[in-house]
Image (tube, rainbow, N blue to C red):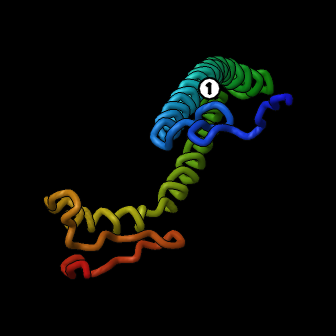
Amino acid sequence: MAHSVSTTPLAGRPAGPAEPSVGTLAKSAMADMSTLIRSEIELAKTEVTVSAKRGGIGAAAFAAAGVLLAFAAIFFFIALAEFLTWLGLTRWISYLIVFALLVLIAAVAGLIGYRQVKKIKKPEKTLETLQDLPDLARREAPGQRQHDLPVVRNGQVVRQDPHARLR
């Protein structure tokens, strides 16, 4: 009589490789999550550094262009005054006309700037939430908070009574 090999696993042994415990899985997941977060932070740092460097170079280029444009404007206005002299006006009157033109342009630019500054609104929502800071700064032991905090819903601060106790 031939002996056959049993294909069923023995009673006390698992069929495949040992499965890790829940604690091991949680530890592994936390390590993977930590590695992922660190990698994302490193990627963000690299991208921000490159963007900031390019932004700085761009700002410097705009500043240089502005300075050169200011120098060019000086020569343009001298040429304009000389052109008025060439048309037959005396030199001092030509330069006075150019000066008056520059004062007029500066006045218009100042008026536009003044109107834009007047349109600036105060940050009302921020000021409203800042009024709640004294209530938020109460010293309460962690887990022992007894007062509701203000909540922002749909861009509006919903204020609870700062003196009401939690239920």
Is 73 left, or right, of 44 in this rendering?
A: right
Is 126 left, or right, of 17 in this rendering?
A: left
Tell me: residue 146, above or below residue 18. below
User: Is disc 1 placed on a helix, strand or loop?
Assistant: helix
Rendered image quadrant of residue 102:
top right
- Point out the image quarter for the C terminus: bottom left
Is residue 67 something one can see in this rendering? no
What residue is pinned by disc 1?
Answer: 47
Q: Nearer the viewer, residue 146 or 102?
A: 146
- In the rendered image, residue 6, in percent from the top left (x then y), is placed at 76, 35
- Please tell me how crowded label 1 is: few (under 14), some (14-19), or many (20+) other residues with Cα within 10 Å: few
Q: Nearer the viewer, residue 121 or 109?
A: 121
- In the rendered image, residue 148, in percent from the top left (x then y), is placed at 28, 73
Residue at 48%, 36% (x, y): give it.
Answer: 24
Residue at 54%, 53% (x, y): give it.
Answer: 111
Tell me: residue 141, above or below residue 106. below
Rendered image quadrant of residue 123:
bottom left
Name the residue type under label 1.
Glu
Q: Nearer the viewer, residue 131 or 24?
A: 24
Is residue 89 something one can see in this rendering? yes
Tell me: residue 106, above or below residue 62. below
Residue at 59%, 49% (x, y): give it.
Answer: 108
Is 129 left, or right, of 139 in this rendering?
A: right
Determine the residue located farthest toward the front in the rendered image. 1
Is 160 left, or right, of 78 in this rendering?
A: left
Count the marks.
1
- Point out the image quarter for the N terminus: top right
